[in-house]
Each structure stands twice: as C-alpha cells, then as structure tokens.
Image: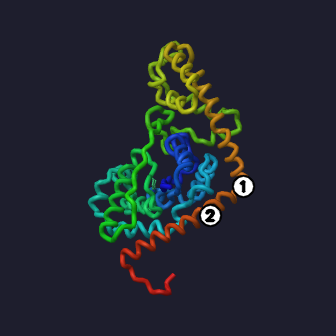
Amino acid sequence: MKTVFSGIQPSGELHLGNYLGAIRNWVKLQDQYRCVFCVVDYHAITQTYEPKEMARRVTDMVVDLLALGIDPERSLLFLQSSVPEHTELAWVFSNVIGMGVLERKTQFKDKSEHQPENINVGLFTYPVLQAADILLYKAEAVPVGQDQLQHIELARDIARAFNHRFGKVFPECEAMLTNLPKLLGIDGKQKMSKSLGNHIPLTVFGANDSGKALKKLLSRAVTDDKRVTREDAGNPDDCPTIGVMHKQFSTDEELAWVRTGCTTAGIGCVDCKGKLAENMLAHFTGYAERRAALLANPGRVEEVLAMGAQKARAIAQRTLGEVHKKLGLWRPKAAP
Ligand code: TRP
C-alpha cells in the first residue's frame, strides 16, 4: 500500500473551502492508501500569532477533522511538534539544499511581503521542514493544492540530493493533484479564507438553529453580476459562489432546475440559495452529530493525538536512525 502524507496548519475550525479543497479528499484517500495526516503547528509559528490561542486552534481543528471522517484507527493523525524528529530531519536537510534554491521560492517572497515586520528564518526554511514532514514517513504521494507544488518539488530535490550524496533512504515523492473545485469566498472575489473573513465555517452546520446562520451567510454570497434584479437572466457557470457550491451538493436533476431557473429568470437567487442550504445541511448532518459528541468528550481529542504521536514517532525514529547511519554520525553505544 502506498503512503500518502499531508499537512494542515492549525487554523482552528475548518471552513467549507478546507473541506471541498482538501479534507473531503483526505477522507476518501483513507480507503486506498496508508495515510499520514499532520497538524503542522511548528509551521504555524512562522507567522505572527497569539500563543494563548494555539491550543484552541489545534483542538478545534482536530475535532473537525475527526467529525468529518478522518479515522484515527486507519490513518495516522498527530501534531507535528509532538514528534521532534520532524525538526531534527529538517536540520539534516538544511545541509543538503542550497540557499539559492530556497531564495527562488515565491511563497517565501509572498509571505514576507505579507508580514514585513517578521521576516524570520523559519519562514525562509519553511519548505525544508515540510520536506522533512513528508520524507520521515517515506510518503510517495502528497495531496495538495496548486500553491504547494513548489514545496513538493523541493522535497523531491532534497530526497534526490540526500540519496545521491549519502545513499538511498528516501523515495521521490510526488504531488497528488486532484480535480477539486476552486471555491471563492462569499465575496465572490478571493479564495475562501478565514483570514479574509469571506468563509463559511463548518460550525454553521452544527448550530442547531435550523440553518439560520448558514442562510444568513449564503444570503450575502455574491452571485452572477448579470442578475441585478430577479427579472434578469443569469448563468450558474458565471455565479462564482452558489453556482460552484450547487455542483458539489446537488443532484443532476436539481442542477438542471438551477440552470433552467437561472437562465430564464424563472427562479430567483433566493430560491436557488434556499435549495443549496437544504442540501448542504443534509450533507453535514453526520458531521454535526459527531462534532457535538466530540465536544462533549474533550478527552477524546487528547487520546487520539497521544496515540497518533506514539505511532508516528516509532516510524520517524526508524527513518532518522537510517539517516544517522548514512550520515556517518557516531554515537556512543550507551546513548539512547
Ligand atoms: N504548507 C502546507 C500548507 O500551508 C502545510 C504543510 C506542512 C504540508 N507540511 C506539509 C502539506 C507536508 C503537505 C505535506 O497548506
């Protein structure tokens, strides 16, 4: 069975963009691959953040991952900082990769522009830690979005450079790009993101308010701009928010209803959004129930993460042992 690795920053509760763009795919991958999913808190500290909020961000996210169907019995699910081998291997890797290669990575440039007051070394070596994440588990495939391709390419370069210089330890991993919808935020302009505030948090599906919070968000979602009034005809393909979401949650019949209604102005956006809300709420019923159960049992998250860390460390230590050997690092026999 092939090994798949993916990581996610602990941003707190997940939103619809995370779900459609990544997590839904992770849940499916569990049927076919040995999956390793890591909440990358050491990566998160490269950005300015509030320490008091970190524990919450992690636990909220893990609750959501479990409620969405990540199964800790089948997959590894753990917190990056609980497995110190990640940073150890990153240090080793920082010795096989040139400064110039990292300097050319655009994500570093983008992120430094985003926080000019905090351009730290961690931000610069971020992709080296990411390569260590993947390669510690000898993962062959990495499900990620387009924006991460440069990092996966670097991980492959690092694996190759290490193997070439010290002997083969690592497989050359590949990105696994699935055809996922590009979901814009409800502003209809930018990618859905928590920091932009244009997101639909998954918590609205567990709100126990008959969908009120969801409907309120959907009512603000920007639709096809040709439909200024209800009498104007539109096209679901030009609807940057609701059109895209309907394709994810509605049946072919319902999609035909949307198309006819929209292109002939037979239905209004309110009708279209109402149907979407209904389907979304139905889709996330199981999530909402599992989330409520997890929130009532906070020990469960700790238990899952402790078990995950233990299993992950066993693998990570084995890989790092091989690395030490290849590097020729000498250890006194009595050392642990
Ligand atoms: N850089 C990724 C992101 O911001 C998170 C990440 C860290 C990751 N390590 C990884 C993704 C390893 C895939 C594999 O989304």
Task: Left or right? Give the position of 261 relative to 145.
Answer: right
Q: Position of residue 140 (x, y in %)?
A: 43, 56
Counting other residues with Cα less than 10 Å from the Cα at mark 2, is it few (<14), some (14-19), or many (20 or more)? Answer: some
The secondary element bearing badge 1 is classed as loop
Look at the picture and state if 236 lies above or below 53: above
On residue 307, the disc is: 2
The secondary element bearing badge 2 is classed as helix
The amino acid beneath tag 2 is Met
Q: Residue furthest front?
A: 1
According to the picture, the residue beneath numbered tag 1 turns out to be 297
Counting other residues with Cα less than 10 Å from the Cα at mark 1, is it few (<14), some (14-19), or many (20 or more)? Answer: few
Residue occupying the point 61% across, 52% down: 71
Q: Where does ligand 1 appear, by image quarter?
A: bottom left
Residue occupying the point 58% across, 26% down: 273
Q: Position of residue 64 (x, y in %)?
A: 61, 48
In-front residue for pair 313/274: 313
Q: Position of residue 245 (x, y in %)?
A: 53, 32
The amino acid beneath tag 1 is Asn
On residue 143, the disc is: none
In-front residue for pair 224/80: 80
Q: Is residue 79 visible?
A: yes
Q: Position of residue 134 (x, y in %)?
A: 44, 59
